[in-house]
Amino acid sequence: MSETSRVDLHLHTTVSDGYLTPRELVRRAHANGVRTLAVTDHDNTDGLAEARAEAAALGLTLIPGIELSTDLGPVGVHILGYFLRYDDPGFQARLAPMRDDRLNRAYGMVARLGELGYPISIERVLEIAGEGSVGRPHIAQALLEAGHVGSIAEAFDRFIADHGPAYVERMKLTPQDAIALIHAYGGVASVAHPYDAPDVDGLIAELVAAGLDGIETYYQGYGPERVEHLLALTRQYGLVPTGGSDYHGFPMGDAQEVDNDVGSVPVPEETVALLRARAG
């Protein structure tokens, strides 16, 4: 990694589907030269207290965040939330069904893998996940350990990617619902990795109508053309260009060929001030 950003606003821990604990992630950020970071675990904020304590000890700024998994028709859309009142009991009550759904999906995918002739143990999957919320990288790791695949990426490509033979649908939440939920608890909403959608312009227009605040413009593998396209959209709609490495610690599909260590995606420092100004 030739250059490290001082800002990384898209990071995962063992609380969802990351490889490092919240404390370990903050230490890695510090070692890599990151000074402002957001922990954005999927549908879960249980790691924020530990991350904030470690960030305070190391003199880093920790932005409370989350990544909500949603669907817009057949398209999966992830919404990042920043600066929200994550410890509000009302917010946590809304997250509880999503956390339960992740566990149910894991059981379902393990069952489907067995039916396909690639058995793994749900006990081992949960052991890999540890105290965190179980996710597909943990299932992929169990497939790798069992010798059914040669890499984490192969596990996704052959079995558990969206619409793969062992994939199980998640609980349905629309991006409009996610934006409203984030706003209800004082947060700022940005759409994650927008090029996952087949029609980026249409997606952004639809989410702007729902109150979107930002677009993840600086992202692993996004070259100058994509960045300029997304910057043009932020200017058109008056949105904040956000960014981050989307670090999990596992090789994630095609991202195994991209250096997406903590701080590996350059994010302008003024992004933090722009997000903070929009927080409720």
Image (spheres, rainbow, N blue to C red):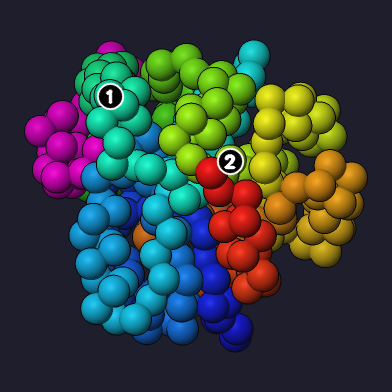
**Rendering quarter of residue 142:** top left
Task: Residue at 82% x, 55% y: name it.
Answer: 231
| Residue at 75% over, 47% down | 239
Residue receiving disc 2: 189
Membership of 124 in magenta stretch:
yes
21 to 65, vertically: above or below: below
Q: Amino acid at mark 2?
A: Ala
Q: Residue at x 43, y 81 (%)?
A: 32
Q: Is residue 162 above or below residue 248?
A: above
Is residue 251 visible to the viewer in this orientation of the structure?
no
Image: 57 above or below 280: below
Circle 1 is placed at which residue position? 93
Q: Depth check: 114 or 88 in front?
A: 88
Residue furthest to the front in view is: 280
Q: Residue 108, percent across and down? A: 28, 17
The correct choice, above or below, for 260 with respect to 19 in the image is: below
Q: Residue at x 50, y 55 (%)?
A: 10
